Every structure is written in C-alpha cells, then in structure tokens.
Amino acid sequence: MASPEETIRICIQMLQNISEDSTIPRNIRRVADSTRSILQDESRNIGLRAATAISMIDEISNDPNMPVHARTRIWELVSQLETVPLD
C-alpha cells in the first residue's frame, strides 16, 4: 500500500490529467485544478487536504455534463483519496 504522501502525489497527477483533457467541460477542469492546488498546499495537514479534495470532487461528480470516462476517473480519484488517514 502506498504512503499517504505517495497517494497524494498520484492524485495530483490524476487531477492534472483531468484538467488538461479538452473533452471534459471547462467547469469540471476548473474544479480539478483548484482541487490540485489544495492537495499541493503543504501548510495544511495531509488528512485535511484529502478530505477537502473529496468534498470538492464530490460536488462535481454528479454534473450531468460530465463524460462517462471522466466520471470513472473522478470515482477512481475519490477512492484513492479515501485511503489517506484523517489524523
């Protein structure tokens, strides 16, 4: 199992890929970019960063304009973030 830091690094890369994918609507790419910035903010606790990111991603996961392939990637991302301990 990957360390929390490694998991965050993987999630940042996944968000980078989502934000660069032109087939995904702009509003979803914008949230992915904002979420990536939160995960990179090392002044916050790693668990807090993960929880905040999950909350932000959860808001866009039900967007009716989201393509199916993007929705699958979002769910995979949330699954990864849920493995990060909150403490």
Image (spheres, rainbow, N blue to C red):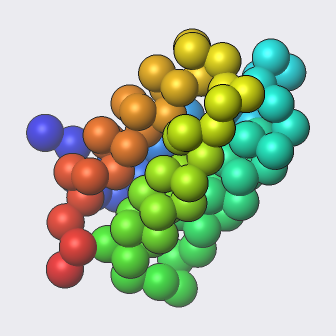
User: How far from the left and from the top, in percent, is residue 50?
Assistant: 40, 63
**Residue at 32% of width from left, 72% of height from top?**
47
Viewport quadrant of the C terminus = bottom left
Relative to 68, 34 lies left or right: right
Which of these two is toward me, 25 or 4? 25
User: How far from the left and from the top, in percent, is residue 54?
Assistant: 43, 57
> What is the residue that sits farthest to the front in this orientation?
64
> What is the residue that sits farthest to the bottom in this orientation?
43
How many numbered marks are there? 0
Viewport quadrant of the N terminus = top left
Do we see residue 46 in this rendering?
A: no
**Residue at 67% of width from left, 47% of height from top?**
32
Which of the 4 image quarters holds residue 37? bottom right
Residue 1 sits above or below residue 84 on the image: above
Relative to 46, 24 lies left or right: right
**Residue at 52% of width from left, 76% of height from top?**
42
User: How far from the left and from the top, in percent, is residue 48?
Assistant: 38, 77
Relative to 41, 76 lies left or right: left
Residue 71 sits above or below residue 8 on the image: above
Relative to 2, 74 lies left or right: right
Which of these two is toward me, 55 or 22? 55
User: How far from the left and from the top, in percent, is residue 66?
Assistant: 67, 27
